[in-house]
Amino acid sequence: MKKLVVISNTPSPNTLKLREAVVNGAHAAEVADLEIVELDPREATPELIMSTDGLILGTTENLGYMSGLVKDFFDRTYYPCLDHTQGLPFALYIRAGHDGTGTLRAIRTIVTGLRWKFVQEPLVLQGDFQDEFADQCHDLGNAMALGLDLGIL
Ligand SMILES: Cc1cc2nc3c(=O)[nH]c(=O)nc-3n(C[C@H](O)[C@H](O)[C@H](O)COP(=O)(O)O)c2cc1C
């Protein structure tokens, strides 16, 4: 049984919609042997990250940086995971009112340190909210689930 973990802060209906779209996309892949776990960043522990086969992280951009909850997630998990999660298939989406670059730069640096593997270019969902953002998140969840099933990530 493989495990896909989806972690995101969801301070608004739109951001909740994005996380649900990722999870729905993963379920739509209909992979029998895949457990899909959806969490708030506060619930995510190093043990969980060490036990997962793939991680999709979502964050808002706040004040030019990732959300405080996602920063706290990295603060708590970085060193415990460092020697145990290298190569972890990882994907990122950022919901940003108008920018997203500061968040993207910071998370790229952290993930490079952890040696996690980006499985696709991060999604920066920028500007006024569009339904297409949810479609992109759905596709991300779907691709990750299928990739884990096929063993190609
Ligand atoms: C305190 C605060 C700071 C924010 N700072 C930024 C920012 O630096 N860059 C940006 O692109 N958006 C910023 N935003 C906008 C949020 O990223 C956006 O509102 C959030 O992702 C939720 O998206 P939604 O409005 O579609 O629900 C900020 C929002 C808040 C409340």
Image (cartoon, grey):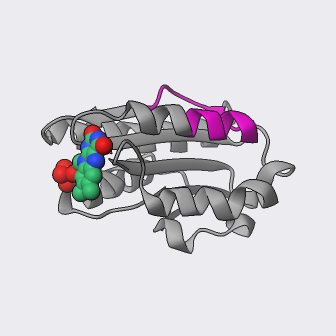
Q: Residue at x 48, y 25 (%)?
A: 121
Left or right, 17 with respect to 69, comes to left
**As drawn, is 89 to the left or to the right of 105?**
right
Let me know if residue 112 is in the magenta part.
yes
| Quadrant for the C terminus in the image | top right
Whether residue 33 appears in this view of the structure is no
Could you say which is closer to the camera, residue 68 or residue 1? Answer: 68
**Can see residue 95?**
yes
- Asked if residue 125 is positioned above or below residue 28 in the image, the reply reads above
Residue 30 x/y as whole percent: 46, 51
Where does the N terminus fall, quadrant-wise?
A: bottom right
Q: Magenta part of the protein: which range?
A: 107-122
Q: Decide if residue 93 is on the left or right side of residue 83.
A: left
Which residue is situated farthest in the right direction here?
A: 83
Query: What percent of the width, then of the height, locates residue 46?
Result: 72, 65
Q: Is residue 134 left or right of residue 139?
A: left
Name the spot of residue 71 as percent of width and height, x first: 53, 56
